[in-house]
Image (cartoon, rainbow, N blue to C red):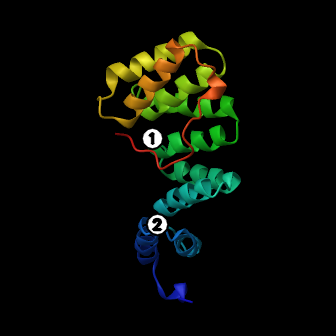
Amino acid sequence: MLDLSLFEGDELLALAKLDIENSRIDFALAKLKQANSLPDPQPECDSLLAKLYAQLNLFDRASYHYESYLMKKPDALLERFQYGMVYYEQSIKERALLVWKEVLDEVPTFPPALYYCALVSWEEDNEPEARRLIDILLKSAPADNLYFKRGKELLNALDNNVNAGSVTPPRFENQKIN
């Protein structure tokens, strides 16, 4: 076993990123936990820990680290969006919507937030709101954007009167802005 105490925080963070790229989540988690326990840890540790914990379905831990990160970096839209995903994955949709609306207040055309707000609106039988959000998404996102494609699929489901419960949304993932 590697003695992680030999490494400084930036080294641990860099090594953890390599572990994540190579799908060695357990090794990444060990390094990130060590880096985060050092005096004055880098904020990115919280961001990466939050993402890993969310992927592991340890949502309380993910929430804690997203909150910690967002206290240090309140303008981090991607992490704020992902924080909403933690609530969505737990079926706390009202809270997820509140978080995503904070994102949309900052960037009204943020594709992932538009898509998921539309999805939740549809799931809650608010078809007009779902269509409004999809319209914004399709007018603002480039056609090669992942959420443009998902928005078109959601609009198609709405047009075909598909039951919202019959469509399976994607699980938590490392969301990308573009």
- Residue 161 quadrant: top right
Q: Is residue 103 above or below residue 123?
A: below
Q: Is residue 61 above or below residue 12?
A: above
Quadrant where the image shows the C terminus: top left
**Badge 2 is on which residue?**
20
> What residue sits 33% from the left and 28% below the top?
141
Marks 1 & 2, CB-CB < 8 Å contact = no
Q: Is residue 87 above or below residue 68?
A: above
Label 2 crowd (10 A; few <14 / some 14-19 / many >=20): some
- Tag 2, which secondary structure? helix
Return the residue nearer the eye: 74 or 45: 45
Residue that protrudes farthest toward the top in the picture: 128
Q: How many marks?
A: 2
Is residue 156 visible to us here?
A: yes
**Badge 1 is on which residue?**
77
Return the residue nearer the eye: 113 or 152: 152
Percent across and percent down for residue 10 are 41, 73
Give the Cα separation between the discs numbered 1 and 2.
22 Å
Please state which amino acid type lies under the numbered disc 2: Ile
Quadrant where the image shows the N terminus: bottom right
- Tag 1, which secondary structure? helix
Q: Is residue 86 above or below residue 113?
A: below
> What residue sits 55% from the left and 49% below the top?
71
